[in-house]
Amino acid sequence: MPKALQPHPDRALPAGEARDVARRIHASTKDLPLLCFHGHVDAGLFATDEAFGDPAELLVVPDHYVTRMLVSQGVSPDRLGLPRRDGVRTAEPRDIWREFCSHWQLFLGTPSRYWLEHEFAEVLGLKVAPSAETADELYDEISARLAEPEFRPRALLDRFRIEVIATTDAATDDLAQHAKLAADLPGRVIPTFRPDAVVHVDRPGWSELVVDLGVRAGIDTSSYAGYLEALRQRRQAFLAAGALATDHGHLSASATPLDESAAARIYETALRGEVSTEDAAAFAGHMLFQMAAMSAEDGLVMQLHPGVLRDHHSGIHGTYGPDQGHDIPVATEFTRSLRPVLEKFGHAEGFRLVLFTVDETAYSRELAPIAGVYPSVRLGAPWWFLDSPDGMRRFRELVTETAGFYNTSGFVDDTRAFLSIPARHDLSRRIDAGYLANLVVEHRLEEDDAFQLAQDLAYNLARSTYVH
Amino acid sequence: MPKALQPHPDRALPAGEARDVARRIHASTKDLPLLCFHGHVDAGLFATDEAFGDPAELLVVPDHYVTRMLVSQGVSPDRLGLPRRDGVRTAEPRDIWREFCSHWQLFLGTPSRYWLEHEFAEVLGLKVAPSAETADELYDEISARLAEPEFRPRALLDRFRIEVIATTDAATDDLAQHAKLAADLPGRVIPTFRPDAVVHVDRPGWSELVVDLGVRAGIDTSSYAGYLEALRQRRQAFLAAGALATDHGHLSASATPLDESAAARIYETALRGEVSTEDAAAFAGHMLFQMAAMSAEDGLVMQLHPGVLRDHHSGIHGTYGPDQGHDIPVATEFTRSLRPVLEKFGHAEGFRLVLFTVDETAYSRELAPIAGVYPSVRLGAPWWFLDSPDGMRRFRELVTETAGFYNTSGFVDDTRAFLSIPARHDLSRRIDAGYLANLVVEHRLEEDDAFQLAQDLAYNLARSTYVH
Amino acid sequence: MPKALQPHPDRALPAGEARDVARRIHASTKDLPLLCFHGHVDAGLFATDEAFGDPAELLVVPDHYVTRMLVSQGVSPDRLGLPRRDGVRTAEPRDIWREFCSHWQLFLGTPSRYWLEHEFAEVLGLKVAPSAETADELYDEISARLAEPEFRPRALLDRFRIEVIATTDAATDDLAQHAKLAADLPGRVIPTFRPDAVVHVDRPGWSELVVDLGVRAGIDTSSYAGYLEALRQRRQAFLAAGALATDHGHLSASATPLDESAAARIYETALRGEVSTEDAAAFAGHMLFQMAAMSAEDGLVMQLHPGVLRDHHSGIHGTYGPDQGHDIPVATEFTRSLRPVLEKFGHAEGFRLVLFTVDETAYSRELAPIAGVYPSVRLGAPWWFLDSPDGMRRFRELVTETAGFYNTSGFVDDTRAFLSIPARHDLSRRIDAGYLANLVVEHRLEEDDAFQLAQDLAYNLARSTYVH
């Protein structure tokens, strides 16, 4: 008999004496609207509002949390239909789905399992758990569901109670989808300015992108001064399109400015395709400082996501491209790296820096002490591999005592998987409810304060961080 | 209606099955005398025994835990009356107090809130919680209290059951206050030798301090040999004044000796004001080794507090000076850094080294393995940002399994805030009671052993560490 | 009255609501056979099957966990009878045993205490706890027990339900004991290929060992090519003797291959005794890559144990030799260090890499992300200082959410102390039962899945990791 799919009402709440308190706290936040100020859902989804594709295309192929786990246990990327750069199609949707369902036990104890159970049961209304036996039945059931009008992206936006959702957009993006969205759903789907591709001067294709940047901005980028001006102009265009924030993914958190002449020299060398690895890294750190300076001027909230070595396996990258689960974190230093930015803008009114990490060692050692004194800084929600029950609990335990609650940013879902958004926010609210409930039963927090904090963590802090 | 201030009798004890055991363990330690072998209360407080100043001056302005949190949420240092180097007075005490009270919710979940509630309720006898509404009433009530004779420093020393309290004193200090204290309160308030200012040769004013050191010691410090001799003499003066320990705050734990000639060369360069940053760092590491060598001779316990980058924000430092909450930890290495000291003195009878850290990653990786084999080493109590409920719990969880209990040093309060001392010791005793109680209910420790350990952690280990 | 020795049936299980679930899970795994695919018990023990020596020789002297704790509290190595290189015998067995018993309280809260209580009560049938008073009585009782035939090594192998036990053997070992064992106990006691001594070219005696290697392999090792070929031949000899795995203890996890010519040059320099420290380190990293390449060919599972600075105290090393408790961990990097091996073999069928660490910071940051995508990688059980109740719990909490359960290797006991093996496996099963039970009561895992996982963690994963 197939196993029933029944997410428990108390899931991810603490056991014992704290459960009842946690339940009541969670009950008070679970229906609050969702603020999705940082994520990677495609703007086109909402702009066109077309029906989602098949179950594999929606739930398996684009979710690198899911595909990396299957790959780690010997399922080849080709059997999962990861899109190849050579365009060869390697697997049929139904076969991909079967592969996923028959490996469902691999996800035990992972947040992917948690999110997917929530999506399957509460979003898609499925009744049985995935398995080799139930794969076809589930495939057909999901396919039927996705064809219904109430499963179109905009309908789900309402059903999920999403108040605002931010997408992530390249500095060179034409923002056409966002123009349509601003007309159709004013203020509800907004862009985020992500200049990574144009500040890493040694990446293949960089010089072409800088030309695009210039064309898009209407400014000649053949000089460093023009390049800076074009970035400034693009930020204005994003602001006009409703953007609240920028986002920066760098290998290191280093944000040390160079002399303008040194920066200009590296820029010119890079345009000639002759930049060294060291100079490119120095330029990236310099540009992080420049982005902070521009944020201090124009008010866009600066989000920093450092410390991931992307495309760890060049063979996978060569065949399938980036974002295929082969990004691995490295130790990340913040105290010295961010000092130039914090000395200059850490006390500047109007500057807001949200710091994320996948290196938990920095929580209590560097990040909480930094956020606990610099008015510009907020600590971002646990990121990527750490957006999980124990990961989120550790975040609270490691930062609260030094940074308090009010120097944290509120939850951001940070996902490409639109259907997982309610599950992720709900999980975060459950973990915070449990953390607060434990403080209450250990008499480290009074219950009325816990209820207020729960509202703040679930909603108010995200708003005050991004709309500052 | 104002909220009542009622610290719960079970606060910071575990919930569930362990609570009752923890209660009984805590009951057995809560009235033990306090041994305060490391702290930063001003000796003059006890020497003069004058009444404390106003509530803001006592409880807000000098407490960098409190002011940094307020600053992090946008309250300017000037509104908090942080003393400026230019002498301009920027805020009235009552206004500072109002600022603090109206931001009371910022401290939720922090040890500052915990300590202050204890001080307000149990030391000062206040009945209502701070808020914008209650600020004035509390200000007046505290002011009245502080004028009473039983709130003089020496009266509180008795009331707090403080058996011994150590202050921290510069190598150049004349120890005049301590001479008076030795006469009035023999053996109860003792100095600690802190030579940081005279071993960091690139700090502004170093060369003047070295002259002072020579004058104080009656030894010419214009040569490196004289400098060493003056330090040796000053340590003897501290010993004569009752000191049990030295204290060393260095950026790195490096303790690598230089050739005597190289050390002398750097010393002479520094006297000429021409020392390089690299040489200054090497000299600091060299002097850490020298201090260990002197401790092995004279028996002063060596306390090492490495890994904090002081004065992270030069603007704040310029306007308000050091110790204003802008000190941020960095990753700290111990295994290689301390090797020269441990090879030479780690098995030396009479040498005692107490290691502190604000980098928790070193607990299980380096510090517990080091303390778990070298007879000279004890692990200091969780320090600074980590002197908190979860911080202290993690310390026990991360070090006990490798170092045991008897290679830890017992609690030290490490505070400038005299009124917080009972709260800090009590919190430490509660957390240890909870940790032990959890071991008992998980059948990892028998209850009679837990009671013995609780006494050792609360009292005996501090004594045997510092009086060795 | 002496204290009774009564390990509690629920020891190391969680308290509260999870206890009953944990009990049932543990009941389902506690009688499963033991798979000991990694450890350091001497093969000769089983080959000769002679009675164990006296209590001190069996339980104190060779156990560096035990002796390091005693040394840390001032008991000199000589009083513990640590074997000296000069051959001087410094203590009588009974005196050593008394020293140990009278310091029994030092082990409170440590896994050594846990293991020894289990051994004393359940293996040796002792009834009273060690103390100064009971030392002699226990000494005599254990001595009598060890003289009985059912306490011979092979009898205990059966009683402990050990299905397979791997020893660790130098690349130059003649495997004579293993030949006898293969005849007497086919497939039950197997060797592990450990080439550390022949790949670290700057260690004293290396050049003699390389000659031995050549003699053993029948291949001239005076050239680098011959050296590689001899290693390849020795691996075949180990395979023929039943080996499943290799083991590598390096200071760093670096596995960067050199040009063949550069490697050959370093090899030749080392043979002349002129190698630099830098070249030796580079060669060690090169050889780690070569070992991976050979594993990809011959299928021996590659086990990597990096990050311990051996022989931290040269005086102790000089007098007593290696493995005397003075090995201290250092921070260890994996993401960049292992990249060459993972790019080349991380997706290679037939290659299996098991990663261990004593640096817990790498669990969530690097190791779980690596194991969670590379099919070749499994995460080894918590190692050395971390093979403890809280250490094992943290391992599960820090890796499961990213790597899942099925990318971990199952438990290995990693011990020289044969009598501790059942205690170590049982403790691991208890901690996993508690971890799973907590997930069940927090409704993060269903109970039937928990039972299946418990079987997998206790038995199936070790088998599938090493017999792949």
Image: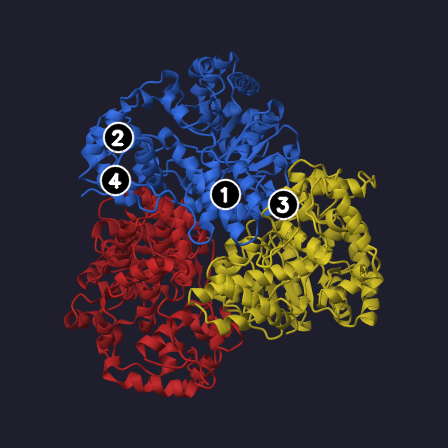
Chain colours: A red, B blue, C yellow
Q: Is residue C404 above or below residue B33?
A: below
Give the amino acid type for the residue marked by disc 2 in the picture.
Ala
Which residue is under mark 1?
Answer: B332
Q: Nearer the viewer, mark 4 or mark 1?
A: 4
Give the amino acid type for the residue marked by disc 1 in the picture.
Thr
Which residue is under mark 3?
Answer: C107
Mark 3 and mark 2: Cα distance apart in space: 47 Å
Q: Quadrant of the C terminus of chain C?
A: bottom right
Relative image position of residue A250 (x, y in whole percent)? 39, 57
Neighbourhood count class around disc 1 (C-alpha, 10 Å): few under 14, some 14–19, many 20 upward: many
Q: Do the residues indicated by labels 3 and 1 lie within the same chain of the protein?
A: no
Q: Is residue C399 left or right of residue C94?
A: left
Q: Earlier in the sequence, mark 4 or mark 1?
A: 4
Q: Which mark is residue B129?
A: 4
Relative image position of residue B376 (x, y in whole percent)? 62, 34
Which residue is under mark 2?
Answer: B56
Q: Secondary structure at mark 2?
A: helix
Image quadrant where residue B157 sits: top left
Q: Nearer the viewer, residue B105 or A465?
A: B105
Mark 3 and mark 4: Cα distance apart in space: 45 Å
**Who's the residue at 39% across and 85% down the image?**
A138
Can you see residue A348?
A: yes
- Chain at tag 2: B
Q: Secondary structure at mark 3?
A: helix
Q: Nearer the viewer, residue C111 or C352?
A: C111
Q: Which mark is residue C209?
A: none
Q: Do the residues indicated by labels 4 and 1 lie within the same chain of the protein?
A: yes
Give the amino acid type for the residue marked by disc 3 in the picture.
Phe
Can you see residue C84?
A: no
Q: Quadrant of the N terminus of chain C?
A: top right
- Chain at tag 3: C
Q: Do the residues indicated by labels 4 and 2 lie within the same chain of the protein?
A: yes
